[in-house]
Image (cartoon, rainbow, N blue to C red):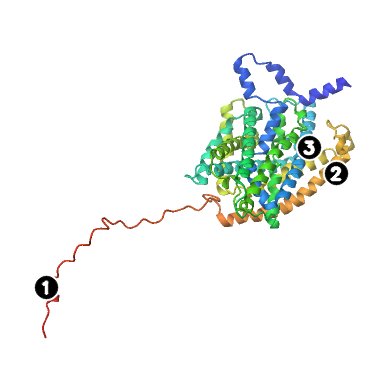
Amino acid sequence: MASTDKVVETVIVGNYVEMESEDGKPKDVKSKISNLFWHGGSAYDAWFSCASNQVAQVLLTLPYSFSQLGMMSGILFQLFYGLMGSWTAYLISILYVEYRTRKEREKADFRNHVIQWFEVLDGLLGKHWRNVGLAFNCTFLLFGSVIQLIACASNIYYINDNLDKRTWTYIFGACCATTVFIPSFHNYRIWSFLGLLMTTYTAWYLTIASLLHGQVEGVKHSGPSKVVLYFTGATNILYTFGGHAVTVEIMHAMWKPQKFKAIYLLATLYVLTLTIPSAAAVYWAFGDMLLNHSNAFALLPRSPFRNMAVTLMLIHQFITFGFACTPLYFVWEKAIGMHECKSLCKRAAARLPVVIPIWFLAIIFPFFGPINSTVGSLLVSFTVYIIPALAHIFTFKSAAARENAVEQPPRFVGRWVGTYVINIFVVVWVLIVGFGFGGWASMVNFIHQIDTFGLFTKCYQCPPQQFPPPAAPLVMNATAPLPPPPPANLTHPHHIIHNP
């Protein structure tokens, strides 16, 4: 029995064990430093990647969602969708291990190939599933990258408002394009670690600054006040815990992918310690004012601490842009036949066209906050909730598939019966509440933003510009007496007085 377990372990881990043993341990200091900061593949690296990717700019929009939902609903939806997101991330990890095991038994070599979600669907369920998964996944990651770019412009404006948000979008689009030089998720080790530190600082800054600021005069907490706003806020939280569209790529970067099963749940538990206190504190302090300020930074007074939080979030959004865009780079490389090219510069040049549509869309739709809910309802609902649950159901629908599954469902969820019940609940709930009601509400809100601000708006939700009062007319010497009028010319015909 022990030997059988060892065979399965080797099959699952596959070429990562071979790669480690071939490379050996680094001998020189330069190689050791490079591996320490650059080449990650442990369970800890995966945890940092998941937690850092999940709690990006959405941290700043959750108080806005609380103003739409109310305090109690906001907290409950975070807990509910956090648990649901962890479940579907677990399903994706199971399907990845199943696919990879089957392929490696067929002597497939993934040494220079990154497995992606659409390939898992193709290998397990066929080309129709692959096409649907590819369409939803790429569109979601495209708009996920757009949101990070919009967030960069929105945040920097609160430090330097000499330039409008659209101009800042141009600048940060060029900066984020440098992510084409990061080869894969292996190379995000130090960035994931720093990114999580940055969001941790920002979350606790929002919490402490709001509590010290206290409630504004006449604060009101009227949420939920409208059905449209309620479901818009709920879908933003659905989007918050739907960051596992890059789960497969993160797993593939691990040396032992089978250890991923509980990592996303542990990452979510940590994220909840950041999102709930910060959103609740900001909503408590500012209440309904948040309905017109989707970025929490907009209401907090300027201070060195706020400037530090904004700066850290800018760096983190650059990292998260890379997280969202890297799978798109892989898809594009595979489409043009550059994925297995070993030249980093050639691959970077080939990736640049991916950034251009992201840049353009961020300029068209700069609606920071409302765009999160729209993407959450229309794309996240299918990409990371409905499709993984349905894929798991159909992959293991036969008794033979369930019996030969590499990973059996845990006992505490009721084995296969319990798993099927949970999967069906996820599909029905997200389809009706997330996609149905959430899609309707978020689209109504999104169209309202377009009607109010217009496409290509120069500075979304910026305060009206204050023009200086007109200057008084210039007087050379206001206190000097006026010169006497010139004497009348009595010889002029009009001044001659005729006697009657």
Left or right: 482 with respect to 317? left
The mark lying in front, picked from 3 and 1, is: 1
Q: How many marks?
A: 3
Q: Could you say which quadrant of the image residue 355 lies in?
A: top right
Along the polypeptide, which appears first: circle 3 or circle 2? Answer: 3
Q: Is residue 470 visible?
A: yes
Q: Nearer the viewer, residue 96 or 376?
A: 376
Q: Is residue 52 above or below residue 154?
A: above
Residue bearing the label numbered 3: 91
* Disc 1/disc 2 C-alpha distance (Å): 113 Å
Give the class, few, some or many, for how many residues have Cα within 10 Å of label 3's Cα (few <14, many ≥20).
many
Place of residue 111 in the rendered image (x, y in percent of width and height, measured from the top left): 70, 25
Disc 1 vs disc 2: Cβ atoms closer than 8 Å?
Answer: no
User: What kind of element bears circle 1?
Assistant: loop
- The amino acid on which the numbered mark 2 sits, given as a three-letter code, is Val
User: What kind of element bears circle 3?
Assistant: helix
Residue bearing the label numbered 2: 421
Give the class, few, some or many, for how many residues have Cα within 10 Å of label 1's Cα (few <14, many ≥20).
few
User: What kind of element bears circle 2?
Assistant: helix
Place of residue 284 in the rendered image (x, y in percent of width and height, measured from the top left): 66, 48
- The amino acid on which the numbered mark 3 sits, given as a three-letter code, is Leu
- The amino acid on which the numbered mark 1 sits, given as a three-letter code, is Leu
The mark lying in front, picked from 1 and 2, is: 1
Q: Is residue 301 above or below residue 412?
A: below
Residue bearing the label numbered 1: 490
Along the polypeptide, which appears first: circle 1 or circle 2? Answer: 2
> Who's the residue at 41% across and 56% down the image?
469
Place of residue 183 in the rendered image (x, y in percent of width and height, measured from the top left): 62, 29
> Who's the residue at 85% across and 23% down the image?
5
* Disc 3/disc 2 C-alpha distance (Å): 13 Å
Along the polypeptide, which appears first: circle 3 or circle 1? Answer: 3
